[in-house]
Image: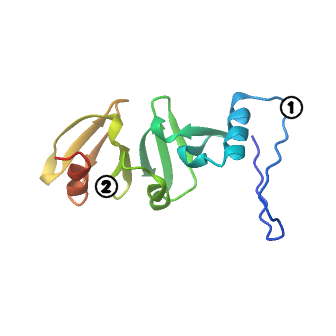
Amino acid sequence: MKVNLFVSRDIEEPYADIHTNELTDNITKAMSILESDESSGMLAVKKGSDFALLEFSDVYMFRVEDKQVKVYTEKGEYQIKKPLYQVEETLTSDFVRISKTTIVNLKKVERVAPSLKGMMFIQLKNGLKDNISRKYLPDFKQALDL
């Protein structure tokens, strides 16, 4: 899907025009979100040339890889354009940063175990694994009430 954004200071109220040859579930969902002004629970992501809307509750992990922010869900891997610090500002307390490059959804954690040099190892319910760095370990423990 091709997306165009036009910013103009002459417009009093934002509006969106959608041009399509078929009304898909994603377009219907996007229309509903745009009309309700309750888009805070949704995240626009990209997979290849396709765009999709994800609920934050479906996200397992945000991780920077090759200078791109990847979004991992049970179903797959997506990309977003926002830098990780901007994503972090919009997240609920269900999410916690575990390293300079990674934020995880606490509701998707399967297990946590000790790792090397004072770090901890984390495994998510979809099989993803990462290390919790020493710098972020106190915040992680606090988020879990440990």
Q: Note whether 141 is above or below 8 in the view shown.
A: above
Q: Residue at x 15, y 48 (%)?
A: 116
Quadrant assignment for the N terminus: top right
On the image, the x and y values in percent for residue 132 come to 25, 50
- Give the left or right position of residue 63, taking residue 22 as reference: left
> Within 10 Å of the Cα at label 1, are there few (<14), some (14-19), or many (20+) other Cα atoms?
few
Q: CA distance from mark 2 to mark 1?
A: 44 Å
Coordinates of residue 34 in the picture (x, y in percent): 70, 46
Q: Residue 9: x, y in percent?
A: 79, 71
Residues under numbered marks 2 and 1 in contact, where contact means CB atoms less than 8 Å apart: no
Total number of numbered labels?
A: 2
Up-down relation of residue 117 to residue 61 (above or below): below
Q: Earlier in the sequence, mark 2 or mark 1?
A: 1
Q: Residue type at mark 1?
A: Asn
In the picture, measured across the screen, residue 43 lies left or right of residue 26, that is left
Instruction: Report the residue at 43% width, 47% height from top.
Output: 62
Q: Which mark is residue 21?
A: 1
Q: Residue at x 22, y 52 (%)?
A: 142
- Residue 5 lies, in percent from the top left, at 76, 56
Dot 2 amino acid type: Ser
Q: Is residue 27 left or right of residue 86?
A: right
In the displayed structure image, the side of residue 41 where residue 36 appears, left or right: right
In the image, residue 71 above or below residue 82: above
- Give the numbered dot on residue 99: 2
Of marks 2 and 1, the one in the foreground: 1
| Label placed on residue 117 | none
- Name the secondary structure under disc 1: loop
SS at mark 2? strand
